[in-house]
Amino acid sequence: MNSAEFYVLVHVSNSPDRTLQLSDIAKVSNMSLSRLSHLVARLEAKGLGTRSPSVANGRRVTLVTVTNAGASLVEAVLPQYLEYLRRTAFSLLAPGELEKLAALSQYVLDGIEHN
C-alpha cells in the first residue's frame, strides 16, 4: 500500500459512516478525480474500500466507503505510522516550531475546504 492509499483510507475512515463523496476526497487530497478513481479501484481490489453511485443535491455522485477490513487496517497501522512521524519528522522541531506548523497546517486545510 502506498502513502496516498493510506491517506485516503484514514480520511474516509474518520468520516461519518466511513463514507465520503469521491469529489470531496479529491479536494482535500489534491488529486484529480481520474487519479483518485484509479486509487479507489486499487482499494476495492484489496477489499479495503468500495464505490457506489448516489444522488446528492440532484447530482449523481460516487460514494467511497471504507470496508470493515479497511477500517481494521487503519486501526492497526495508524498508531505505528504516527509514532514514525513523531520519531522522524516532528522530533526535528522545537516546541514553538511545532505549534507554528500546526497553525499553518490548519490554515491550509481550512483554505482547501473552502475551495
Image (cartoon, grey):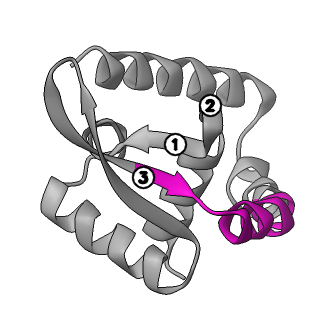
Q: Disc 1 versus disc 2: distance between alpha carbons?
A: 6 Å
Q: Earlier in the sequence, mark 2 or mark 3?
A: 2
Asked if residue 32 is positioned above or below residue 115 in the image, the reply reads below
99 sits left or right of 59 in the view: right
Q: Which residue is mark 2?
A: 16
Dominant secondary-structure state across the stretch colored magenta: helix
Span of residues in magenta: 64-81
33 sits left or right of 107 in the view: left
Secondary structure category for the residue under label 1 = strand
Q: Residues within 10 Å of mark 2 (few under 14, many from 20)?
A: few
Disc 1 residue type (three-letter) = Thr
Q: Which residue is mark 3?
A: 64
Q: Residue at x 44, y 66 (%)?
A: 4
Q: Disc 2 versus disc 3: distance between alpha carbons?
A: 12 Å
Asked if residue 8 is positioned above or below residue 3 in the image, the reply reads above
Secondary structure category for the residue under label 3 = strand
Q: Which residue is mark 1?
A: 19
